[in-house]
Image (cartoon, rainbow, N blue to C red):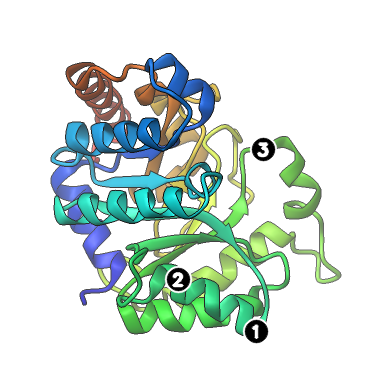
Amino acid sequence: MTPFGARLRAAMDSRGPLCVGIDPHAALLESWGLADDIAGLETFSRTVVEALADSVAVFKPQAAFFERFGSRGIAVLERTVADARAAGTLVVMDAKRGDIGSTMAAYAETFLSPDSPLFSDALTVSPYLGYGSLAPAVDLARRSGAGLFVLALTSNPEGAEVQRAVRSDGRSIGATMLAHLAAENAGAEPMGSFGAVVGATLGDLSSFDLDINGPLLAPGIGAQGATAADLPAVFGKAVGNVVPNVSRGVLKHGPDTAALRTAAAGFAAEIRAAVPSA
């Protein structure tokens, strides 16, 4: 398979870089007039995919909101992933997995093996057992043409106590993760497959080298307070590789499919205005 970075670059160039989350939490199901059960979960997920799969570059389902229903929820997640990918939309599984050895390998096989019913184009992972603990996921992603998004500078306030902690060499943990990713992506064209999660709400990040030759998944636009207009100031010269994620800002407009499309198109237009290359 063509590497994820190349496929993502093509999708961003043709559809724009907007990533829409699929986050069926209980309050959102209720606001759609749906029950907080399997039927509601399935209706919600199917509606989002049917409304947006032909226009957005990326979907990002949050695995936890499906896993809370047990095996039936996982079955809905499998169908959601399959339907989205069949429609030509890339899927980033937001599962934030992180462990060591055979356990990390099993997580990787769940989401990054082409033989798995949950095979996704990319997976979010946590490196805070040490970047080297991600090796099974990195290796399998390379073999399968998939990608990773590594938590580097997240938008939650608590993240700073770990990510901005300074190592003995004077470099922060977050900067260390970015450096590892730049090394993974060295020489990749048009873009590497190993990206970072960097919050769009973080303000000036000029002290960090975000130019990792890979994608930067940027949560925080919409409900968390960031706007598309903030992107150039936050990401600087790396802004062309930013994949802005919007979840509630789009999803709150359901279940009306036309309203979902209008909301996504509005965010996409704002991103294009702020980032001319988008």
Give me the residue at 25% from left, 31% from top.
47
Q: Nearer the viewer, residue 169 or 164?
A: 164
* Side (left or right) of 219 relative to 268: right
Q: Which residue is mark 3?
A: 156
> Of tags 2 and 1, which is closer to the observer?
2
Label 2, secondary structure: give it.
helix
**Quarter location, residue 148:** bottom left
* Side (left or right) of 74 relative to 78: right
**Label placed on residue 110:** 2
Amino acid found under the numbered disc labelled 3: Asn
Marks 2 and 1, Cα distance to the nearest angstrom? 15 Å
Q: Is residue 126 visible?
A: yes
Which part of the image, by quadrant, shows the N terminus?
bottom left
- Across and down, in percent, residue 62 comes to 47, 45
Amino acid found under the numbered disc labelled 2: Thr
Q: Mark 2: give few (<14), some (14-19) or many (20+) Cα within 10 Å.
A: some
Q: Is residue 55 above or below residue 256?
A: below
Give me the residue at 51% from left, 45% from top.
69
* Side (left or right) of 24 relative to 132: left
**Quarter location, residue 92:** bottom left
Give me the residue at 65% from left, 78% from top.
133
Q: Mark 3: give few (<14), some (14-19) or many (20+) Cα within 10 Å.
A: few
Marks 1 and 3, Cα distance to the nearest angstrom? 28 Å
Q: Check contact, mark 1 vs mark 3: CB within 8 A.
A: no
Q: Which residue is mark 1?
A: 101
Q: Nearer the viewer, residue 177 or 236?
A: 177
Label 1, secondary structure: give it.
helix
Amino acid found under the numbered disc labelled 1: Gly
Marks 2 and 3, Cα distance to the nearest angstrom? 27 Å
